[in-house]
Amino acid sequence: MQLKSISGLVAGAAVASAQCAIPVAPLPTSIPAPFRVEVQNITRPDVHGKHMNLYEAGGGDQHLFIGPVGNLTLDLTLVNGVINWLPGGVRAVIGGEFSEIDHTTKMFMTERGDPKAVFAPTYACNPDVPTETQVELSFVGWEGEPAGGWICVRNSFDGSHEFRYSPPGNDLVDVDRECVKVTLVVRPADETTRRRRRA
Ligand SMILES: *[C@@H]1O[C@H](CO)[C@@H](O)[C@H](O)[C@H]1NC(C)=O
Ligand SMILES: *[C@@H]1O[C@H](CO)[C@@H](O)[C@H](O)[C@H]1NC(C)=O
């Protein structure tokens, strides 16, 4: 009897602590401390836990990939909801390479004035460690377009995936090159150096 009630208590405590604590105060729309972006989709191990790398393109632009291509980038910041890489003077925008087959459009970084990708920092529980709180960059929308949609990653060269925007309500899928919906997670640079690294 005594033992049973103790194990009941322990089980209850385990359930109570299985969820992370979400702070009540909202997050500001800028994150000045340098971070790396982790990509999550717990049902898709091929992309889950990988990171946003920068890949030098023409005219000072940087294209965005998850490994194995591109440079590991620990010094991203968020400025009014827009991902910036200040050393290169570039910010994340959406435009170009529209795909007729799945209606997605490339997200990349440039210093030019293309319409931006806008995100809102949001607290959530880490799907890998449900007791741990993380800050996600919840996708708000493509500047100048109807709000909503999501960011996805699609197969590209040398086993990498490129970042793309999918418009609200889009259900077109290119079966040969599915664009996998992902959550972008802020990994502070100082925390990243302590973690197990995945390209
Ligand atoms: C990685 O960074 C180095 C140093 O800035 C640069 O020379 C190189 O072109 C970059 N590589 C890619 C793929 O962007
Ligand atoms: C994972 O990707 C699939 C395919 O894009 C999508 O339907 C699903 O909603 C994604 N799951 C999460 C948790 O983002």
Image: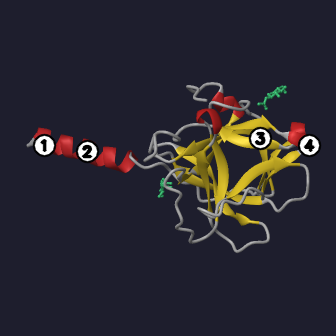
Q: Residue at label 2?
A: 11
Q: Residue at label 4?
A: 59
Residue 4 position (above or below residue 114): above
Q: Residue at x 57, y 68 (%)?
A: 170
Q: Amino acid at mark 1?
A: Lys
Disc 2 vs disc 3: which is toward the camera? 3
Q: Residue at x 91, y 43 (%)?
A: 59
> Whole-Å distance between the Cαs marked 3 and 1?
51 Å
Furthest residue toward left: 1
Task: Say what secondary structure mark 1 lies in.
Answer: helix
| Image coords of residue 132 (percent x, y) | 50, 42
Visible in this render: residue 41?
yes
Q: Residue at label 3?
A: 76
Q: Which mark is residue 183?
A: none
Q: Are marks 1 and 4 in contact (CB under 8 Å)?
A: no
Q: Residue at label 1?
A: 4
**Seen in the image, is 93 located left or right of residue 5?**
right
